[in-house]
C-alpha cells in the first residue's frame, strides 16, 4: 500500500499461518499473472483466504524471506499492519515493526485508513460481512488523533 518495499524488515509475522482474506479483485489480478486460484486461494470459514503451505503463505519464499508476488500482493497484505478487529475496530498490529513508522506518518496513515474502509466495504459486498461502522469511525478517529498527538508508543516495536 503506502509503504515502499524497502521498509519491510521481513520478520515474516504477517506471512506465517496467514489468515489473509482475498477480494475478488485480488484473485483476478494474481490470476492474470499466471497463477491458478486453486494454487493460492481456498475457502476457510466464510472467506476465501490465501493458502498456507508448510505453515506459511504459499507465496512466501522462506529462503529469501520475501513475498514472491510483492508487486501484485493482495490489498489486505498492502494494508497490513493496519487491520480491523471485531470488537476493537481499526488498529495497528503491534506485532509488526512497521506499526511505529505508521504513527510517525499521519498522512500515510490517513490514506491507509481510506483504503481499509474500501476493503471493508468490499468484504460487505462480496462476503456479506457486517462491519460495525460506528466502531470503525470512532477507532479511526482515535488512531488519527494519537498519531497527530505523537502519543502512541508500542512496546513491541524496535
Ligand atoms: S501474499 Fe506476500 S505479503 Fe501477503 S501473506 Fe503472502 S507472502 Fe505475505
Image (spheres, rainbow, N blue to C red):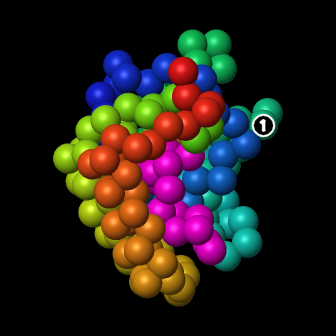
For the N terminus, the image quarter is top left
For the C terminus, the image quarter is top right
Extreme-left residue of the structure? 107
Extreme-right residue of the structure? 54
Which quadrant of the structure image shows residue 152?
A: top left
Local secondary structure at mark 1: loop
In the rendered image, residue 14, in percent from the top left (x then y), is placed at 59, 39
Q: Residue at x 32, y 57 (%)?
A: 145
Instruction: Decide: is 118 above or below 49.
Output: below
Task: Using a 10 Å C-alpha cutoff, classify the residue at mark 1 as few (fewer than 14 neighbours), some (14 to 19) or many (20 or more).
Answer: few
Q: How many marks?
A: 1
| Any part of residue 106 in sight | yes
Which quadrant of the structure image shows residue 47?
A: bottom right
Q: Which residue is mark 1?
A: 55
Q: Residue at x 50, y 83 (%)?
A: 132
In the rendered image, residue 98, in percent from the top left (x then y), is placed at 45, 32
Q: Is mark 1 within 8 Å of ligand 1?
A: no
Relative horizontal placement of residue 5, taking residue 136 as reference (left or right): left
Which quadrant of the structure image shows residue 27?
A: bottom left
In the rendered image, residue 118, in percent from the top left (x then y), is placed at 32, 69
Give the magenta-colored segment's residue range.
75-93
Relative horizontal placement of residue 72, taking residue 62 as reference (left or right): left
Q: Nearer the viewer, residue 24 or 2?
A: 2
Q: Nearer the viewer, residue 54 or 93?
A: 93
Residue 84 falls within the magenta-colored stretch: yes
Q: Nearer the viewer, residue 53 or 17?
A: 17
In the rendered image, residue 77, in percent from the top left (x then y), is placed at 47, 46
Instruction: Decide: is 152 above or below 131.
Output: above
Amino acid at each position: 500500500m503506502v509503504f515502499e518495499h524497502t521498509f519491510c524488515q521481513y520478520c515474516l509475522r504477517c506471512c506465517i499461518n496467514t489468515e489473509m482474506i482475498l477480494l475478488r479483485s485480488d484473485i483476478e489480478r494474481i490470476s492474470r499473472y499466471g497463477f491458478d486460484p486453486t494454487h493460492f486461494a481456498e475457502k476457510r470459514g466464510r472467506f476465501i483466504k490465501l493458502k498456507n503451505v508448510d505453515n506459511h503463505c504459499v507465496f512466501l519464499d522462506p529462503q529469501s524471506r520475501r513475498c514472491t508476488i510483492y508487486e501484485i500482493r493482495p490489498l489486505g497484505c498492502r494494508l497490513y499492519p493496519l487491520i480491523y478487529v471485531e470488537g476493537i475496530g481499526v488498529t495497528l498490529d503491534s506485532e509488526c515493526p512497521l506499526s511505529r513508522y505508521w504513527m510517525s506518518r499521519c498522512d500515510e496513515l490517513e490514506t491507509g485508513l481510506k483504503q481499509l474502509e474500501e476493503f471493508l466495504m468490499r468484504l460487505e459486498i462480496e462476503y456479506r460481512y457486517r462491519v460495525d461502522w460506528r466502531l470503525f469511525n470512532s477507532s479511526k478517529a482515535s488512531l488519527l488523533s494519537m498519531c497527530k498527538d505523537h502519543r502512541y508508543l508500542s512496546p513491541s516495536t524496535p
